[in-house]
Image (cartoon, rainbow, N blue to C red):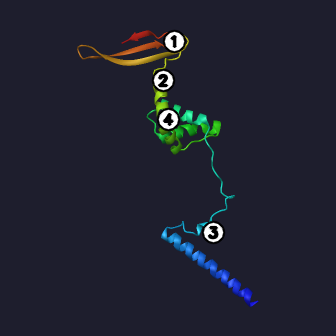
């Protein structure tokens, strides 16, 4: 019986010493003490995260940067998440966007150049019109307001009035 009580006291003392050492290490800011191997979770409890994003995510991020060159990584990540969170259940972080744009800088710049020089699509005649109000200065420095009506399909100026 005496041996059992001594054993319990020894275990209690050992637990107190380990707790004291751990709190001392935390106060010093050195939490990577050798005690980590005793308190670290078992390998089965830790999940190995290796969720690689699909290839289309990278292409979409590059496309979003190409059509919005003034946007930074935060805005592109926000835009991508707003578009694809509900539809495809896919999100990206700012750091993912930064790394993709850094690694594929030539691709998004080339895509930007290609999109800038793309011919406009054909619009059927008489389906969409545009109105423009502008001012023109003559040789006497007086400004004249002009109203123009343009038909997009044929690109004709239907009306030009003062």
In this figure, which residue is indicated by the disc labeled 2?
A: 114
Q: Nearer the viewer, residue 47 or 60?
A: 47
- Residue 148 visible: yes
Using the image, tell me which numbered label, if any, was put on residue 153.
1
Mark earlier in primary sequence (1, 3): 3
Using the image, tell me which numbered label, if any, was put on residue 59.
none
In this figure, which residue is indicated by the disc labeled 3?
A: 38
Q: Residues within 10 Å of mark 4 (few under 14, many from 20)?
A: some
Whether 42 is drawn above or below 126: the answer is below
In this figure, which residue is indicated by the disc labeled 4?
A: 104
Locate the C terminus by quadrant: top left
Mark earlier in primary sequence (2, 3): 3
Q: Please give the name of the residue rendered at 42% of the width and 18% of the height, measured from the top-left corner.
A: 132
Cα–Cα gap, marks 2 and 1: 23 Å
- Residue 73: % across, % down: 48, 40
Q: Secondary structure at mark 1?
A: loop
């Amino acid at each position: 019986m005496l041996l059992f009580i001594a054993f319990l006291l020894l275990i209690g003392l050992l637990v107190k010493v380990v707790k004291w050492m751990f709190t001392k290490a935390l106060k010093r800011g050195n939490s990577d003490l050798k005690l980590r191997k005793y308190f670290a979770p078992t390998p089965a409890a830790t999940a190995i995260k290796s969720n690689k994003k699909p290839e289309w995510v990278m292409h979409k991020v590059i496309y979003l940067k190409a059509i919005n060159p003034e946007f930074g990584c935060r805005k592109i990540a926000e835009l991508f998440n707003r578009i694809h969170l509900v539809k495809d259940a896919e999100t990206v972080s700012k750091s993912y966007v930064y790394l993709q744009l850094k690694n594929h800088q030539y691709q998004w710049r080339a895509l930007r150049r290609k999109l800038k020089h793309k011919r406009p699509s054909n619009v059927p005649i008489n389906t969409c019109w545009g109105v423009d109000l502008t001012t023109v200065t003559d040789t006497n420095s007086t400004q004249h307001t002009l109203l123009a009506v343009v038909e997009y399909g044929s690109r004709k100026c239907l009306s030009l009035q003062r």
